[in-house]
Image (tube, rainbow, N blue to C red):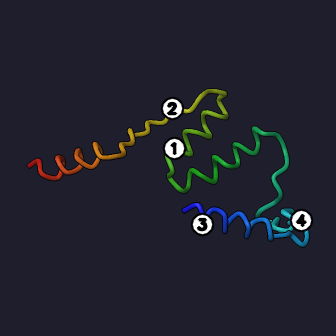
Amino acid sequence: MAFLWENLAKQLDSIRASEPFNYGALATPSNPPSEGSREERLKAALKAVKATGNKQMIESLTAALEGREAKIDIPSIESGPQAFLNALNRKEAP
């Protein structure tokens, strides 16, 4: 595994950008560059995200607009041998 990381590090060292990327070139009349206040950008992002139905992103942007911390219910993540055994027990349970 160490060899893979060393190889990746060598490859990244050999990469050189020819020119800085111009993000303004991505702007189109329907997608203008993001200018304005933070609140305006957050409102625009919220409007765009509402169409996707992503509840976590909507809550996060709404909380940012309201100046509070987002209330997102994230399930616990199990890992390791105990998690494997718990998963087996759940599959065997009727």
What's the residue at 75%, 45% (across, down)? 41
Circle 3 residue: 4
Q: Earlier in the sequence, mark 4 or mark 3?
A: 3
Position of 13 with respect to 94 (left or right) is right
Kind of residue at disc 1: Gln
Circle 4 residue: 20
Alpha-carbon distance for marks 3 and 1? 35 Å
Alpha-carbon distance for marks 2 and 3? 39 Å
Q: Give SS at disc 1.
A: helix
Position of 89 with respect to 58 (left or right) is left
Quadrant location of residue 58? top right
Q: Earlier in the sequence, mark 1 or mark 2?
A: 1
Percent from the top left, x then y, of residue 24?
A: 87, 63
Percent from the top left, x then y, of residue 68?
A: 62, 27
Alpha-carbon distance for marks 1 and 2? 9 Å
Circle 1 residue: 56
Alpha-carbon distance for marks 2 and 4? 38 Å
Q: Depth-wise, is mark 3 or mark 1 nearer the camera?
A: 3
